[in-house]
């Protein structure tokens, strides 16, 4: 693969990972747990993409129907991908002793999401080339950031609220799943270009909303002096 294409594919995820590391300003995470979350996020991309290939092949004869697009967006893509990313967050980062403030939920969730998005980018770079990867810098990668922040925000709450832990974790997963499904539905539909515009506007409004989730956990950090 062209080295320039590889750089273009991996740079967005690495830059966002560094940025989220920087906003965790009161008690930053050690490098090794961050790398583990990123690498696990990248690793689960492979089974997720195999499931997507099978699902899209199955739905291909009906690809223009409303039902097929809903199934593709909400099940083949959103549920499939969010389950794998949530598993990385819940089964690896969540129990760690390093996860010692609510902000860490966002940090580890985003690292897993950026590992996933980076590996996905490399796949698309190999298959579709420069134009697709450049487009994904402003679409799919920021979308994974949004879903990661939302899931991680609730994981951060859940870690320190044992009585509500299960409900908060599932609330975060559910919101990430719904946002992802709606976003992909608007992207996959083939009826109106205005719905694609709506998808982009919604994505960047969600990014703005996510900044308030980050600030909430920053302001409530037990390490804030």
Image (cartoon, rainbow, N blue to C red):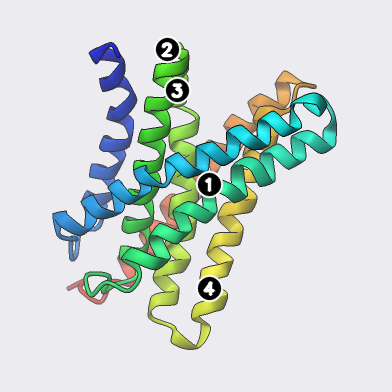
- Point out the tag, 3 or 4, that comes first from the N-terminus: 3
Neighbour tally class for label 4: few under 14, some 14-19, many 20 plus, Cα within 10 Å: many
Residue at 76% x, 40% y: name it: 70
- Point out the tag, 1 or 2, that comes first from the N-terminus: 1
Label 1, secondary structure: give it. helix
How far apart in space, not on screen, are marks 4 and 1 (Cα)? 19 Å
110 left or right of 198 in image: left
How far apart in space, not on screen, are marks 3 and 4 (Cα)? 34 Å
How far apart in space, not on screen, are marks 3 and 2 (Cα)? 7 Å
Give the x, y percent position of residue 68: 79, 35
User: Which numbered disc covers residue 129?
Assistant: 2
- Point out the tag, 2 or 4, that comes first from the N-terminus: 2
Q: Quadrant of residue 152?
A: bottom left
Residue at 82% x, 28% y: name it: 62
Give the x, y percent position of residue 192: 77, 21
How far apart in space, not on screen, are marks 2 and 4 (Cα)? 40 Å
- Residue tagged by mark 3? 124
Residue 53 or residue 171, whichever sits in front: 53
Residue 121 or residue 162, whichever sits in front: 121
Neighbour tally class for label 1: few under 14, some 14-19, many 20 plus, Cα within 10 Å: many
Give the x, y percent position of residue 87: 45, 60
Q: Are marks 3 and 2 in contact (CB under 8 Å)?
A: no
Label 2, secondary structure: give it. loop
Residue at 28% x, 28% y: name it: 11
- Residue tagged by mark 4? 168
Residue at 19% x, 61% y: name it: 29
- Quarter of the image with the C terminus in it: bottom left
- Point out the tag, 4 or 1, that comes first from the N-terminus: 1
- Residue tagged by mark 1? 81
Q: Are marks 2 and 4 in contact (CB under 8 Å)?
A: no
């Amino acid at each position: 693969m062209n080295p320039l294409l590889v750089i273009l594919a991996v740079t967005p995820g690495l830059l966002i990972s560094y940025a989220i590391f920087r906003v965790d300003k009161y008690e930053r995470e050690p490098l090794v747990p961050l790398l583990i979350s990123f690498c696990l996020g990248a690793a689960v991309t492979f089974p997720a993409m195999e499931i997507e290939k099978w699902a899209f092949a199955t739905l291909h004869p009906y690809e223009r129907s409303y039902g097929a697009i809903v199934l593709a967006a909400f099940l083949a893509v959103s549920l499939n991908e969010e389950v794998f990313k949530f598993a990385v967050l819940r089964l690896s980062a969540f129990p760690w002793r390093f996860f010692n403030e609510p902000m860490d939920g966002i940090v580890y969730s985003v690292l897993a999401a950026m590992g996933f998005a980076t590996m996905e980018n490399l796949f698309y770079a190999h298959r579709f080339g420069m134009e697709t990867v450049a487009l994904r810098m402003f679409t799919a990668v920021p979308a994974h950031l949004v879903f990661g922040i939302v899931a991680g925000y609730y994981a951060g709450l859940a870690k320190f609220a044992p009585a509500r832990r299960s409900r908060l974790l599932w609330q975060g997963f559910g919101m990430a799943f719904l946002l992802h499904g709606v976003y992909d539905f608007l992207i996959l539909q083939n009826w109106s270009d205005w719905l694609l515009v709506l998808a982009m506007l919604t994505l960047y409004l969600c990014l703005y909303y996510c900044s308030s989730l980050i600030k909430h956990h920053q302001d409530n950090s037990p390490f804030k002096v």
